[in-house]
Image (cartoon, rainbow, N blue to C red):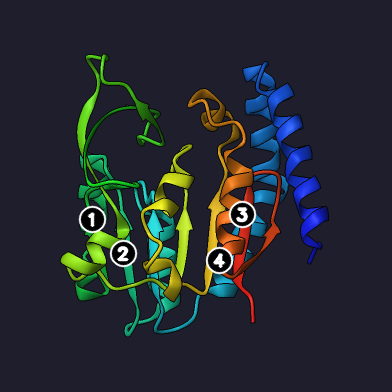
Amino acid sequence: MLPSTMADFFVKTLLAVHRRVDRYPPVRRRIAAISRRSLGEKRVNAALIGVTRRGDCVWDIGANVGLYTQLFLEWVGPNGKVVAFEPVPENAALLRELDAGPQLTVVEAALADADGQISLVVSGESGETSHIGSDSSDALTVRVVRGDSLVANEGVPSPDVLKIDVEGFEGDVLDGIPTALRSARDVVVEVHFAALTERGKPNEPLRIIKLLRDAGFSVRWLDISHFLATRSG
């Protein structure tokens, strides 16, 4: 584990690299694809299976069509719970078709730092890329909700493990779960540097890391876009 000062230097270096690469979208996409094939998927999968225990409650935030949701259902076993968060209606319908009974809860909403609605523009074959776009004719009106609101008011169980992949809204998710985060043991986050820059939040990764450290987690980067936060002690 890197000392916090070295870890901060590493994040700042990542920010500098991403800012330079993000000027050239074809190069960025190629590097991302190579990273996922060579290291990313293996390390992320290994980290997730390493921290998920039988009987856990896992929040799959940004579940998409359920590739990880299905794995989590296997890993937590029949006594575990998986809560899949997905705002795109077509994807949420596919998640429900997994038909895992009480083991799976599908929340058709995006986790955020406030309760309400937003307009979301979705692209990609499975809606894997999305952004706020209220002026677009292709925008969907979707529900956004704080995770803490779901736990307090809708009976959603608190998480032991969180997987967050939300296309540049990582900080918003964490801002909405200060209470639920207290129960979490491990958090795996994909940081979408380019999306954060487009939102005017280029330094958000540093804030996210500080937020998790202040909540009692230590952070280890798995590759250039994913990190694992584990509760210290």
Residue 50: image quadrant is: bottom right
- Asked if marks 2 and 3 touch (Cβ < 8 Å), the reply is no
Q: Secondary structure at mark 4?
A: helix
The quadrant of the rendering that contains the N terminus is bottom right
First-in-chain label (1 vs 4): 4
Q: Nearer the viewer, residue 14 or 4?
A: 4
Q: Residues within 10 Å of mark 3 (few under 14, many from 20)?
A: some
Residue 83 marker: 2
- Asked if marks 3 and 1 touch (Cβ < 8 Å), the reply is no
Mark 4–mark 3 distance (CA, rounded to whole Å): 22 Å
Mark 1–mark 2 distance (CA, rounded to whole Å): 7 Å
Residue 155: image quadrant is: bottom left
Q: Residues within 10 Å of mark 1 (few under 14, many from 20)?
A: many
Position of 79 compared to 220: left or right? left
- Asked if marks 2 and 4 touch (Cβ < 8 Å), the reply is no
First-in-chain label (1 vs 2): 2
Residue depicted at 38% across the width and 60% down the height:
177
Which residue was labeled with disc 3? 210
Mark 2–mark 3 distance (CA, rounded to whole Å): 26 Å
Residue depicted at 64% across the width and 76% down the height:
232
Residue furthest to the left = 154
Mark 3–mark 1 distance (CA, rounded to whole Å): 28 Å
Residue 59: image x %, image y %?
38, 63
Mark 2–mark 4 distance (CA, rounded to whole Å): 15 Å
Which residue was labeled with disc 1? 107
Residue depicted at 75% across the width and 50% down the height:
8
Q: Nearer the viewer, mark 4 or mark 3?
A: 3
Which residue was labeled with disc 4? 48
First-in-chain label (2 vs 4): 4
The quadrant of the rendering that contains the C terminus is bottom right
First-in-chain label (2 vs 3): 2
Q: Amino acid at mark 1?
A: Val
